[in-house]
Amino acid sequence: MDIQITQAENETVFALSGRLDTVTAPQLQAALLPAFEQATSITLDLNEIVYLSSAGLRVLLLAQKTAQAKGAALRLTRVCPEVMEVFVMTGFSDMLTIL
């Protein structure tokens, strides 16, 4: 997985590409959770995520809980249909803000 991070004032955007799975989920977690210390808004651009496993879902759930605890916003954008199907089947589409 590749992670491109851009920042503008209080918003951080993570553009992700590749597979978000057992191997790459720790990489995203290590980059994402510290971002909540400075940013009040974090956007995950999932346009180029081709696969999402339960380990990836766990990191997204942890990020959502961290955002709520910090009073920050977490948004997912440009979610491809295959990943959206995983969100709908698992109920994550009701827990996450997906634009």
Image: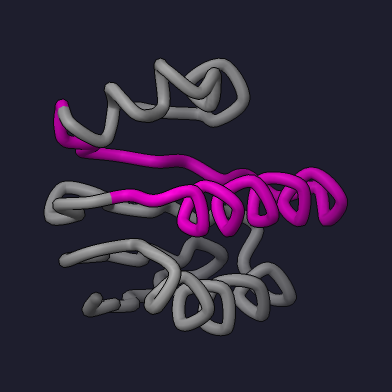
Residue under the image location 46 percent in, 56 percent down: 56
Magenta segment boundaries in residue numbering: 52-81
Q: Quadrant of the C terminus?
A: top left
Q: Nearer the viewer, residue 6 or 59?
A: 59
User: Measured along the vertical axis of the image, is residue 15 above or below residue 30?
Assistant: above
Q: Position of residue 78 (x, y in %)?
A: 20, 38
Q: Quadrant of the N terminus?
A: bottom left
Q: Quadrant of residue 30?
A: bottom right
Q: Main secondary structure of the magenta part?
A: helix
* 15 left or right, relative to 53: left
Residue under the image location 35 percent in, 66 percent down: 14
Q: Is residue 72 magenta?
A: yes
User: Measured along the vertical axis of the image, is residue 42 above or below residue 90?
Assistant: below
Q: In the orientation shown, which residue stands out farthest toward the right?
A: 69
Q: Position of residue 50 (x, y in %)?
A: 14, 52
* 64 left or right, relative to 96: right
Q: Nearer the viewer, residue 99 or 27?
A: 27
Residue under the image location 66 percent in, 80 percent down: 34
